[in-house]
Image (spheres, rainbow, N blue to C red):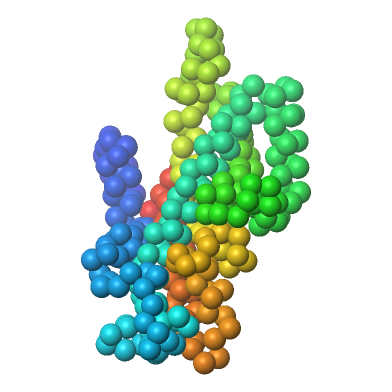
Amino acid sequence: MSEPAALDSARQPQWQRFGKRFLRSRNVMAGSLVLLAVIALVALAPVISPYEPTQQFRRHRLEPPSADFLLGTDNLGRDILTRILYGGQVSLQVGIVSVAIGATLGTLLGLLAGYLGGWADVLIMRFIDMMLAFPGILLALVIIAVLGRNLQNVMIAVGLSSIPVYTRVVRASTLALKQVDFIVAAQALGGSSARIMARHILPNVLAPIIVVATNGVAGAIIAGAALSFLGLGQQPPDPEWGLMLNEGREFIRVAAWVTTYPGLAIMVTVLAINLLGDGLRDILDPRLKL
């Protein structure tokens, strides 16, 4: 980039520079378009499908895709397309709510550990190390065993198990920012720790949080589907992608469409979110230029 072009780019508002990078990123555009399509389809489920997700057509059990049932039916004669659309509402809810829980608590702990230091840092990070000693899915299983089996507890369990990721990212960013001149100046002017963390540090650590949270939604959807597959999440007869996989596994040899289409729904959604997350990482990383 020439020097005049670089100067013009530097004079542009930050949101405008971000918008241009956003539109230039193929990963962001592809992921965004596919994800928006998925969200629109699941949101318009009552309009798209003429059936209810629990409605049974006993004479059409395990029927392959046809004009009446575009993706076929399951062992109880329920329309798979309808159940995928309504199940998507549940899976996306699990992903968003879980990430909101994990990001909120993890960011708070990371800010406290990185800014306060001392015993606060030691206690918080040893607690995080204890959480990291358990695989994420195992930790979620333990939490569900304590709280009980239902969808709300799945979101809590997946959210709590993701706290260490956000805590470590925010702590590292906070440790670097704490030595910057404007933070030191705010401390010298008598700003309280809470005000400095909220007004000065948090806005400057949002970029890595956004990237981690975007990819975290994909991980939370997979984790929620895995827990429902094991019978610990959404309970029958209500649909959920992981639960649909579990319900169709017994018929995979004679009716592969019962498990294939829910699996494809998970794959396409997670792939779109990962593309969006990778693109956002490239856009928000100051060391990279698109």
In the rendered image, residue 193, in percent from the top left (x then y), is placed at 55, 16
The relative height of residue 57 versus residue 23 in the rendered view (above or below) is below
Res 278 visible: no
In this view, the residue farthest toward the left is 47
Q: Would residue 207 be found to the left or right of residue 132 on screen?
A: left
The residue at 52%/37% (across/down) is 104
In the rendered image, residue 38, in percent from the top left (x then y), is placed at 34, 64
Quadrant assignment, res 232: bottom right
Quadrant assignment, res 11: top left
Q: Would residue 37 be found to the left or right of residue 108 on screen?
A: left
In the rendered image, residue 289, in percent from the top left (x then y), is placed at 41, 50
Nearest the viewer among 13 and 91 is: 91
The relative height of residue 271 versus residue 156 in the rendered view (above or below) is below
Nearest the viewer among 60 and 219 is: 60
Res 203 visible: yes
The residue at 42%/65% (across/down) is 87
In this view, the residue farthest toward the front is 58
The residue at 37%/64% (across/down) is 86
In the rendered image, residue 170, in percent from the top left (x then y), is placed at 57, 36
Q: Would residue 287 be found to the left or right of residue 229 on screen?
A: left
Nearest the viewer among 81 and 223 is: 81
The residue at 33%/63% (across/down) is 42
User: How many dots with numbers?
Assistant: 0
The relative height of residue 178 versus residue 290 in the rendered view (above or below) is above
